[in-house]
Amino acid sequence: MLIEEELLLSYGAEIVELKTSEIIFNEGDIPRLFYQIRKGRIKLSHFNEDGKELILAVLHNGFSVCELLLFIDKKYPVNAVAIEPTTILTLPKEKLLKILDEMPNISRDINTFLSKRLYYKYIMLQNNTSLHPEVRIKGALEYHKSFSNIISKFAFEVPFTRKELAAITGLRTETVVRSIKKLEKENYLKIIERKIYI
């Protein structure tokens, strides 16, 4: 968890319940709130000129949502949508900035978190330029595993479906299914009850 829930609540955070497919914000909206996921999953996506959805990230428990945009004067470049029943904490931007002013250690934690997230995002983007689907898939899986504390092999449950993985990597769902089977044969991942573990 990026910021402890009790601290957020003490500064006036609200708990918001979201239904599946409920929109948190749209591309082009102005960032005004800090969002942190208490339970559930949120996708960040963009629709290209052909109307095809590209999923840029799937965020889950403890993750914040596009927090970096609270520090610059830019509109959201993505849509944020709950992909299952989700509970989030929301805090106005001004109150988040007050926390950071009053607690420099929280500011350092956020800087570390953002730096780590950007580092692995660069790695994933490099992998996404590959012509080999397995390389793209590995990049996306490693990116998401990097935000868990799980280091053991086959202990991290991948938090998205094959269709979502296709949208993240820009591949067809059928290609992802074939590649996942190939990666399982290569002992890179395991499939247990249709769930992917790395």
Image (cartoon, rainbow, N blue to C red):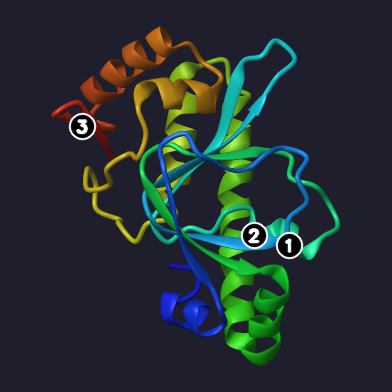
Q: Which of 84 and 139 is in front in this view?
A: 84
Q: How many neighbours does mark 1 have within 10 angstroms: few (below 14), some (14-19), or many (20 or more)?
A: many
The quarter holding residue 154 reads: top left
Mark sitting on residue 190: 3
Q: Which residue is drawn at 34% across and 61% down?
A: 149
Question: Which amino acid does the dot numbered 1 rest on?
Answer: Leu
Q: Is mark 3 on a helix, strand or loop?
A: strand
Question: Which amino acid does the dot numbered 3 rest on?
Answer: Lys
The quarter holding residue 159 reads: top left
Question: Which amino acid does the dot numbered 2 rest on?
Answer: Glu
Q: What element carries label 1?
A: helix
- Name the spot of residue 198 as percent of width and height, x first: 28, 40
Farthest residue in the right direction?
A: 73
Find the distance from the CA under tag 1 to the CA under tag 2.
6 Å
Farthest residue in the left direction?
A: 193
Find the distance from the CA under tag 2 to the CA under tag 3.
33 Å
Q: Which residue is drawn at 57% across and 15% down?
A: 131
- Name the spot of residue 109 as percent of width and height, x first: 56, 75
Residue position for label 2: 67
Apparent side of residue 20 relative to residue 29 in the rendered image (left or right) = left
Q: Which residue is drawn at 39% across and 49% down?
A: 86
Figure check: 19 above or below 7:
above
Asked whether disc 1 touches disc 2, contact meaning CB atoms under 8 Å apart, the reply is yes
Mark nearer the N terminus (2 vs 3): 2
- Name the spot of residue 94 as percent of width and height, x first: 73, 75
Q: How many neighbours does mark 3 have within 10 angstroms: few (below 14), some (14-19), or many (20 or more)?
A: many
